[in-house]
């Protein structure tokens, strides 16, 4: 029942993913959400994220930002990052997932979506037939309240964790962070 919402993998954050291993098994493109995936909601990129993008692009990955944010927000985030983007994406609508496939010029079997929200990033990727990784969303330690969507996500993740056949569908791509 919930499988359309299940990610292929679930990791703590983008730094717990072994990108070299993903490249070796055939992935060539990475589609990222911004807010609460790469940086806290509304924040600009920082040196760590700028370096991260250079690192994964040096491995050979093409990158694309797929965001429901405005063009001004996305361009501000990408100030020091060389990546194509789609703004106002209306995720989970699949139209812009397919547009991302065209823009990257990579078969969808060789693409991954990485995002923090089940009901937008993961649901949209699954509907478009693109493998995906859910990351735990970034939030300030002072944030104690979570919205209704996040509460529903917790329920879905509880079922996901009980369904071994839906977990680790990309293989052993998690890495330990020092």
Image (tube, grey):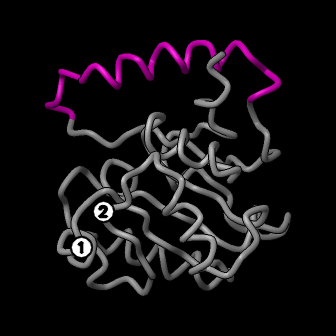
Residue 154: assigned label: none
Determine contact: label 2, label 1, CB under 8 Å: yes
For the point 48% across and 46% down, the residue is: 121
Q: Which residue is mark 1?
A: 71
Decide: few, some or many residues near mark 2? Use Cα within 10 Å; few <14, some 14-19, many ≥20: few
Decide: few, some or many residues near mark 1? Use Cα within 10 Å; few <14, some 14-19, many ≥20: some
Where residue 27 sits: x, y (%)?
75, 67
For the point 46% across and 45% down, the residue is: 92
Task: Classify the position of the N terminus by image quarter.
Answer: top right
Tag 1 secondary structure: helix
Residue 123 lies in the magenta stretch: no
Decide which of tag 2 and tag 1 comes sooner along the chain: 1
Q: Compared to 161, does 94 lie above or below?
A: below
Q: In the figure, is residue 106 to the left or right of 104?
A: right
For the point 54% across and 75% down, the residue is: 63
Q: Compared to 103, does 120 lie above or below?
A: above
Q: In the figure, is residue 114 to the left or right of 163?
A: left
- Magenta stretch: dominant secondary structure: helix
Q: Which residues are magenta?
A: 141-166
Q: Which residue is mark 2?
A: 88
Q: CA distance from mark 2 to mark 1?
A: 7 Å
Q: Nearer the viewer, residue 113 or 37?
A: 113
Name the image quarter holding residue 46: bottom left
Tag 2 secondary structure: loop
Name the image quarter holding residue 144: top left
Q: In the figure, is residue 14 to the left or right of 7?
A: left
Where residue 89 sits: x, y (%)?
38, 60
Where residue 149 sits: x, y (%)?
33, 24
For the point 37% across and 83% down, the residue is: 81
Name the image quarter holding residue 161: top right
């Amino acid at each position: 029942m919930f499988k359309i919402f299940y990610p292929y993998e679930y990791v703590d954050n983008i730094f717990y993913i072994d990108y070299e291993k993903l490249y070796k098994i055939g992935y060539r493109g990475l589609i990222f959400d911004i807010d609460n995936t790469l940086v806290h909601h509304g924040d600009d990129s920082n040196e760590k994220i700028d370096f991260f993008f250079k690192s994964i692009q040096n491995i050979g990955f093409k990158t694309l930002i797929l965001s429901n944010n405005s063009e001004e927000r996305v361009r501000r985030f990408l100030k020091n990052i060389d990546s194509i983007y789609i703004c106002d994406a209306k995720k989970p609508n699949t139209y812009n997932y397919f547009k991302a496939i065209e823009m990257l010029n990579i078969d969808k079997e060789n693409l991954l979506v990485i995002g923090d929200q089940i009901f937008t990033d993961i649901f949209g990727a699954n509907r478009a037939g693109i493998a995906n990784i859910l990351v735990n969303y970034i939030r300030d330690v002072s944030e104690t309240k979570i919205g209704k969507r996040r509460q529903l996500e917790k329920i879905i993740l509880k079922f996901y964790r009980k369904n071994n056949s839906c977990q680790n569908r990309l293989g052993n791509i998690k890495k330990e962070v020092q």
